[in-house]
Image: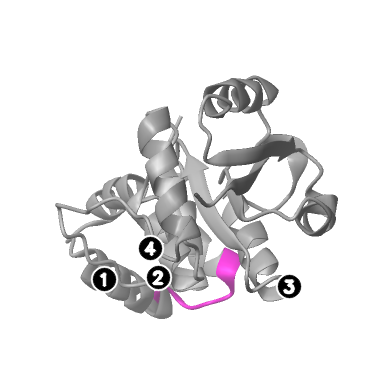
């Protein structure tokens, strides 16, 4: 039996404690650690001989970066480490980005302990663990400019104001919008905002 050392990176101490208790029942887990110190993740991985890092996407006040960015940096400094995103932000764009940067798995926090253990074992053996996407959503990456335009439109800004803020002409803005509509397969700004929220490109409008 392969024994697995786990490191959880999450801003919720109660969730970390609950997960620790849940995983304590499984012989496959040798040690479970959790941290909220983003700056020391590399050190913990090395000192505790971590096999798999469980990383949330939304880390609250722990960092200015989200979990995907931190995971990407970790994989650059420690290419051998296996990372699984464990989050409530289960959206297609995040899953797509996780695959792009070489993350080993993407799991929803609602997962049962038994299924989590099964996923950890598969990843420890070199497999990946991503949810099956029955809707077959194909995501064509939006550029940083296109994402910014979508965010500004969702904030209620008029096209003229957006063009001025981004230092582009209204014609250039229209070209960007056309590209956005084509990528998202929509025909209006309202549809683009709705689909962008569903996919995870922009946060829900409160």
- Give me the residue at 68% from left, 67% from top: 73
Q: Secondary structure at mark 1?
A: helix
Relative to 138, residue 112 above or below: above
The image shows residue 196 at horizontal and vertical percentages of: 34, 52
> On the image, numbered disc 3 is attached to which residue?
77
The image shows residue 111 at horizontal and vertical percentages of: 38, 32
Pick whichever, 134 or 45, lies toward us: 45
> On the image, numbered disc 1 is attached to which residue?
183
Q: Earlier in the sequence, mark 1 or mark 4?
A: 4
> How far separated are the C-alphas under marks 4 and 3?
22 Å
Q: Earlier in the sequence, mark 1 or mark 2?
A: 2
> How far separated are the C-alphas under marks 3 and 1?
33 Å
The residue carrying pointer 4 sits among few (fewer than 14), some (14 to 19) or many (20 or more) residues within 10 Å by Cα, namely: some
Total labels drawn: 4
In the figure, is residue 34 to the left or right of 108? Answer: right
> On the image, numbered disc 4 is attached to which residue?
96
Q: Secondary structure at mark 4?
A: helix
Q: Residue 68: within the magenta? A: no
């Amino acid at each position: 039996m392969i024994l697995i050392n786990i490191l959880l990176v999450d801003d919720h101490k109660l969730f970390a404690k609950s997960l620790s208790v849940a995983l304590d029942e499984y012989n496959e887990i040798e040690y479970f650690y959790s941290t909220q110190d983003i700056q020391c993740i590399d050190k913990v991985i090395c000192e505790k001989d971590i096999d798999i890092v469980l990383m949330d996407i939304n880390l609250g006040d722990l960092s200015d970066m989200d979990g995907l960015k931190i995971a990407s940096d970790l994989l650059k400094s420690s290419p051998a480490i296996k990372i699984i995103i464990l989050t409530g932000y289960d959206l297609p764009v995040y899953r797509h980005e996780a695959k792009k940067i070489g993350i080993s798995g993407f799991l929803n926090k609602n997962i049962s302990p038994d299924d989590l253990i099964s996923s950890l074992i598969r990843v420890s053996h070199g497999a990946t663990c991503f949810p099956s996407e029955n809707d077959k959503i194909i995501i064509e990456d939006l550029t940083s400019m296109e994402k910014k335009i979508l965010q500004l439109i969702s904030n209620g800004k008029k096209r003229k104001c957006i063009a001025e803020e981004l230092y582009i002409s209204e014609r250039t803005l229209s070209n960007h919008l056309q590209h956005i509509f084509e990528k998202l397969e929509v025909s209006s700004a309202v549809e683009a905002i709705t689909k962008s929220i569903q996919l995870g490109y922009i946060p829900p409008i409160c």
